Amino acid sequence: MGGAIMRPSLEGIENPPPTAHGGAIASPAKRSGLAVRLLVLAGIGLAGVLVFVLTRPAPEASEAARPPAALSVTVEPVQKRLLARTLMVTGSIAAWDELPIGAELTGLRIEGVYVEEGERVQRGQLLARLNDRPLRAQIRQVEAEIARGRALIAQSRANFAEARALRGEAEANRHRFDDLQRQGAISEVEATARRTSADTYGARLGGASQAIAVAESDLARAEARREELLAMLAQTRITAPAEGLISKRQAKLGSVVSPLSAQALFTLVRDRRLELQAEVSEVRLGAIAPGQAVAVQTDALPERRFAGRVREIAPAVDAGSRNALVKIDLPLDPALRPGMFARGELRFGAGPALAVPEGALIFDNGRAHLFVVQGEKAVRRAVETGARSGGQVEITGGLAAGEQIVLAGAGYLKDGARVRTAGGAS
């Protein structure tokens, strides 16, 4: 019985009675054996999972260190093109001859304002009116003084005429009585009385003459005062000294003109002329000449172009900026205002130039960059730009003919990124 397997005997164990439904109730021993078998199976499964995990080969080192996928870009070789040569200049719009219009009187209230900024005006046109009632009252008072002065002069002249007649009569009587005294017909006392009467009328005549002079002097002063007041009355009307455009209006209805505000109630662009004052580098100054046409655009009206013309080039270059001021005449258009920022484009004909599409350029802090493909990498490079025309930009430095540049997708690249060319013109 060496190879026999001992099994537990089940003898002596009575079968349980049948249930009411004719079935049998499992014994505790059977339930215990089933649980043991389930635990054994679960253990075998867990052991298999552990064996699989522990024996699985590790990922290849080369796969973990795999570089990122190359980006697909479109490239094009740099080449010379027939490019319209242009020069872009920037600056501010200013009045060619800007004239401040102020008030010569102060302390008066503004009672009327008749123009707005941007309006065109003619010489002599009324712009504003000051309160003139105080001046008119003074004028009436002075005119009354003038009337009294003229009446006084008339009376003084009448008195003078009377005094002159009386003195003449007295002089004649004196001469007659002097003759009678010499003949002994009258006494010395009587002759002396006649002489005294003549002297009295002579003094009266002198007083009348002096009264006329004083009255005439007073009248002249009153008339001068009236002329002054009439001039001041005219100054209450603020008029345009010349034809032009009102570029600024500081006058406000109801405000009192002070010595400070009187200096400039309005600003007039005289002769209807505006100009673009542009700063141009000394290295490009030689290409500009008076009379050259300029196409001007403003940020306020990007859809419009204004025809300008170079009028003046500064004879000296600023030592600090190395720029010179170029003045470009502009048409007087209500849309253009002094102080606006503007750009001017000057054309110099066409010629061969190393150029790239505008879309290939990336601007960073005012510097132009692009990506050059070298092998499998895109290298970021700074370049110098020149003229622009037809979507092409002249490259004046930093790039050589034949180099491959990225046309599309440059905005997503980093310096040294792996690239794959696709659809290029190389």
Image (cartoon, helix red, strand yellow):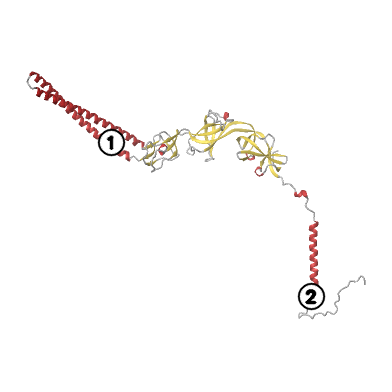
How far from the left and from the top, in percent, is residue 304? 53, 39
Q: Earlier in the sequence, mark 1 or mark 2?
A: 2
How far from the left and from the top, in percent, is residue 379? 69, 40
Q: Quadrant of residue 123?
A: top left
> Residue 218 versus residue 28: which sits nearer the camera?
218
Helix or strand or loop: what does disc 1 sit on? helix
Q: Quadrant of residue 229?
A: top left
Indicate which disc residue 28 carries.
2
> Taking the image as drawn, is residue 407 in sight?
yes
> Residue 115 versus residue 262: which sits nearer the camera?
262
The relative height of residue 413 versus residue 7 in the rendered view (above or below) is above
**Residue for point 79% across, 67% down:** 39
* Number of other residues with Cα within 10 Å of mark 1, as a class: few under 14, some 14 to 19, many 20 or more: many
Quadrant in which the N terminus appears: bottom right
The relative height of residue 253 versus residue 174 in the rendered view (above or below) is below
Cα separation between marks 1 and 2 = 142 Å
Residue labelled with disc 1: 142
Q: Quadrant of residue 90?
A: top right
Helix or strand or loop: what does disc 2 sit on? helix
Indicate which disc residue 368 carries.
none
**Position of residue 225 in the picture relative to residue 76 (left or right):** left
- What amino acid does circle 1 point to? Val
How far from the left and from the top, in percent, is residue 185? 6, 20
> Taking the image as drawn, is residue 169 in sight?
no
- What amino acid does circle 2 point to? Pro
- Residue at the outermost right position: 1
Q: Are marks 1 and 2 in contact (CB under 8 Å)?
A: no
* Number of other residues with Cα within 10 Å of mark 2, as a class: few under 14, some 14 to 19, many 20 or more: few
The relative height of residue 23 versus residue 83 in the rendered view (above or below) is below
**Position of residue 365 in the picture relative to residue 176 (left or right):** right
